[in-house]
Amino acid sequence: MGFLDDNFLLSGRTGSRLFHEVAATLPIVDAHNHLSARAIADNQAITSISDLWLAEDHYKWRIMRAHGVDEVLVTGSGDPRERFRAFAAALSAAPMNPLYVWSHLELRRVFGIETILGPDTADYIYDAANNHMALGATTPAALLQAFGAEVLCTTDDPADSLDAHGTHHGVRVLPTFRPDKAADIGDPREFDRYLTRLAATADQPISSPAGFLEALTQRHTAFHEAGCRASDHGLPDLWNTEFDDADLDRIWQRVRAGRVPTGEELISWREWVLREVARMDSERGWVMQLHIGPVRNIRRRLSEQFGPDAGVDAIGNPIDIKALSGFLDRADRSDCLPRTVIYTMRPEDARAAASIAGAFNGVDQDSAPGWVQVGPAWWFADTEHGIRRQLRMLGETGSLAHSIGMVTDSRSLLSLVRHEYFRRILCDEIGRDVDAGLLPDDPELLEEWVRRIAYENALSFFDLQ
């Protein structure tokens, strides 16, 4: 088997057939990413592969730093060719990192370049890629058509404008409600600036927790009208805390006076926002996505210089299982538990989270299949082995055929190639069990499983039909 040949990641005849005849033909629904709706709508052309690959990709920044590359070539204003050479050298020192496969897969699928990237080939690939880009082959419209994208769900703050969302180049680009800044009162000055933005976007004053919630609700409505069908929450932890309206008023007054909240007050405010958004999601029939466990910006010098996505995040503490089950149970008892996807930063947490998710399915007649489920392998775990482990875990603890499949969680349209990566692994895992006699060799049944996991479930679960 050659590097990235037609059957890479496919070890048997059944998996190969399932991928080439079924999975490879399906459109892409990417239900969680950080793409720019404005860039897609404007069809902005990028003319340098250095900008396309290295402008925002913190995965690539990390391996460049690990290789000792000067920061001026990582996130600074270094010469684009020199920057690309530095990345090529760093990539050549990163075998087994999924970036090695992803980068070469992008070169093949997008640029038609099969040359292996390294220090000796960097200049050739840089020129060949840029010449290809000059022909207009890497505009958002061209890339979306090449990948067969159907729906993209971006990640947007409640205070953001939604003017750029809609159907562009034959693809629905829909917003996702991400209220992380609304939940973060740790820096009163930042929160004050955020309230100014939110009040302007919602076109209403905010002078109390009730007014704050009214503004969030107004934006939730606007997102729904723009086609949004999910909220998303980046959570370092989950909590089990009790509070009342008087507590919220006291916290509000403290923060609005410019005083830093206590740890308990910060947790109470975050959990209040999470509960209220869960209630809104349930009322509107949305999905709630919980991304649990990252520790953000642990290297302050870089995060203060380059912002919150500098590539200095890490895997945090284990999930508080009692807090997660308590949050879901409280929402369930209040009859406001939305369809929920749990993403775990720590692979070790996924099985426990799946066991909790399984307890919150069914009961009501209108419950959709997989009402609460664990999502795909995420961030540090979306490697080949991480994806295989996650698929096995989802199958062993629940109903794999209800899984929502793959999300890129990416800022680059080129990352849509990861859907192919995932689909190959999915087909191989199913095919292996068929070839080993662990699953029936029933083409119709196998093809149904692949179609559902790779494409159809995301459409139905997120109500995107």
Image: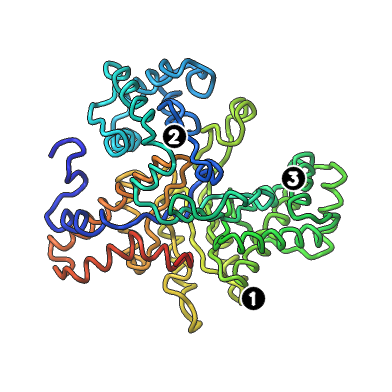
Amino acid tagged 3: Tyr
Question: What quarter of the picture does the N terminus occupy?
Answer: top left
Mark 1 or 3, which is nearer the eye?
Answer: 3
Q: Is residue 184 left or right of residue 69?
A: right
On the image, numbered disc 2 is attached to which residue? 59
On the image, numbered disc 1 is attached to which residue? 334
Q: In the image, which disc is placed on residue 225?
A: none
Q: Mark 3 falls on what kind of element?
A: helix
Dot 2 crowding, Cα within 10 Å, few <14, some 14–19, many 20+ = some
For the point 37% across and 30% down, the residue is 133
Dot 1 crowding, Cα within 10 Å, few <14, some 14–19, many 20+ = few
Amino acid tagged 2: Tyr
On the image, numbered disc 3 is attached to which residue? 194
Q: CA distance from mark 2 to mark 1?
A: 40 Å
Rendered location of residue 50, percent (x, y)? 43, 25
For the point 26% across and 51% down, the residue is 425
Q: Mark 2 falls on what kind of element?
A: helix
For the point 17% across and 44% down, the residue is 6
